[in-house]
Image (cartoon, rainbow, N blue to C red):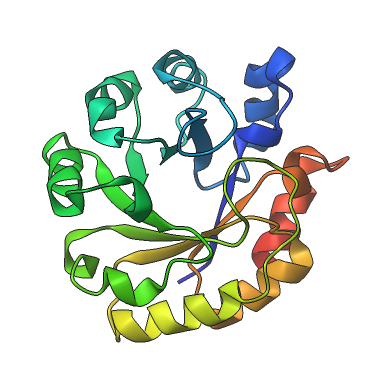
Amino acid sequence: MTVQVAPSILSADFARLADSVRRVADAADLLHVDVMDGRFVPNITVGPMVVEALRGTTELPLDVHMMVAEPERYLADFRRAGADLITVHWEACTHLERVVSTIREMGALAGVAVNPATPVELLTDILPEVDLILVMSVNPGFAGQAFWPRAVDKIERLATLRGGRDRPLIEVDGGINSETARLVKAAGADILVAGSAVFGAPDPVAAIEAIRTG
């Protein structure tokens, strides 16, 4: 399977968000939307209204990453806004299986994210129920952080837990550029989220191709 690249709008120019998205639309596979609530993480970003605006701008699948306490309160809002894939954090869900089931019942793909200090082995029982696992290679909350090298080991362990199956997909988010992309692809990652390395590049399309093929 060819690795997919999901540019993160967290690093886009919000004053020209539609233009930023159009610049990457032909090269990207998904569009990654980081939702932060100021509780689960110390920053606040976007809500369903921005997702709805993006849905009217692009046909790319919208990959909504909910760094949110009690995400079950907002699932329906983001799905109605146009989210195609909704990822919640293991650390934020008391009843994770219920949240995952709700996402899938709404017709979206369901993902589960884990912070750097969370062992992927805790996901063993939920793996058959989800479409994607997101491995954070930085502590969530801010763009532009340096890649955490131990994430490579976590991706390898998760790929082992997955066995020979092609699901759930393994996504990695944080510090991804053409150099770190090689490490996580070799470890078994399927989707690479990149923010600064794409939207901060002079040529975002060339940056996506460098991440995909580098």
**Residue 123 is drawn in which quadrant?**
bottom left
Counting every numbered tag in the picture gives 0
Asked if residue 26 lies left or right of residue 189, the reply is right
Estimate the x, y position of residue 200 in percent, counting from the top left: 82, 39
- The residue at 49%/76% (across/down) is 155
- The residue at 67%/67% (across/down) is 148
Asked if residue 5 lies left or right of residue 59, the reply is right
Q: Residue 205, can we see it? A: no
Estimate the x, y position of residue 72 in percent, counting from the top left: 23, 33
Q: Nearer the viewer, residue 57 or 46?
A: 46
- The residue at 76%/64% (across/down) is 178
**Residue 169 is drawn in which quadrant?**
bottom left
Position of residue 95 relative to residue 75, above or below, is: below
Asked if residue 131 lies left or right of residue 59, the reply is left
Q: Residue 75, can we see it? A: yes
Estimate the x, y position of residue 94 in percent, counting from the top left: 22, 48
Estimate the x, y position of residue 197 in percent, counting from the top left: 77, 49
State which quarter of the image contains the N terminus.
bottom left
Position of residue 179 relative to residue 25, above or below, is: below
Position of residue 80 relative to residue 40, above or below, is: above
Position of residue 174 relative to residue 35, above or below, is: below
State which quarter of the image contains the C terminus.
bottom right
Asked if residue 106 lies left or right of residue 39, the reply is left
- The residue at 75%/38% (across/down) is 199
Q: Nearer the viewer, residue 166 or 102?
A: 102
